[in-house]
Amino acid sequence: MDYVIIALKVIVALSLFNVWLLQKNKPTKWRGGNAQNIVEEFEVYGLPKWMCYLVGTLKVGLAILLLLSIQFPEFEMIAALGLAGLLLGSIVMHLKISDPLFKSFPAALFLAMCLAIAFL
C-alpha cells in the first residue's frame, strides 16, 4: 500500500506542476468556459486575477509538500487535505458556470486521489 500512496503523490504533484507551470498559457479541453489560458479561466469564473496567482501558488506549494511527504510524513495530511479543498473549489467553479461535467473530471479524479492519500 505504501507504494500505491507514493505513486498517487507523484501523479498528483506532477499533474499539478503540468497544469500550473507548463500548460498555464495554453488552451485545453478542461478549461472553464472558453478560456484560452489559466488567467482567462479565473475571469470566466468571475474571480479576480490575484486569486489565480494565489490559488496557483497554493497548489504548487502544496504539491511540493506532497512530494516532500514521501520522505517527511508529517507533511502528508496538510498537503493532501489542502489540495483536496482547492480541488473541490475547482469543481464548484465548473458547476457554477454550468460547464459540461467532463471539464470537472480532472479535479474530481485528483480530489479522490488526495482523499485516498489522506485517509488510507
Image (cartoon, grey):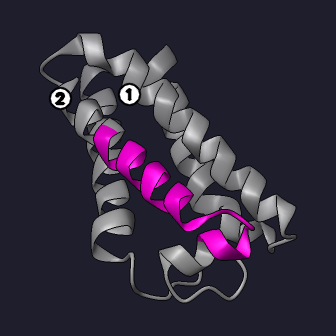
Q: Is residue 31 visible?
A: no
Residue under pointer 2: 68
Q: Position of residue 111 (x, y in %)?
A: 57, 41
Query: Is 49 placed left or right of 54 in the picture?
Result: right
Q: Which of 2/89 is in front?
A: 89
Q: Residue at x 73, y 67 (%)?
A: 45
Q: Residue at x 84, y 69 (%)?
A: 97
Relative height, residue 38 to residue 64 (above, below): below
Residue under pointer 1: 79
Residue found at the very far left of the displayed protein: 71
Based on the picture, tell me whether residue 60 belongs to the magenta stretch.
yes
Q: Position of residue 109 (x, y in %)?
A: 57, 50
Residue 17, by quadrant, is: bottom left
Q: Position of residue 79 (x, y in %)?
A: 38, 28
Magenta stretch bounds:
42-61
What's under tag 2, amino acid-wise? Leu
Of the 4 image quadrants, the one containing the N terminus is: top left
Residue 26, by quadrant, is: bottom left
Label 1 close to label 2 by CB (< 8 Å) = yes
How many angstroms separate mark 1 from mark 2 (CA)?
9 Å
Relative height, residue 76 to residue 74 (above, below): below
Relative height, residue 58 to residue 105 (above, below): above
Q: Position of residue 52 (x, y in %)?
A: 51, 61
Q: Earlier in the sequence, mark 1 or mark 2?
A: 2
Secondary structure state at the residue bearing disc 2: helix
Q: Main secondary structure of the magenta part?
A: helix
Query: Is 81 placed left or right of 34 in the picture?
Result: left
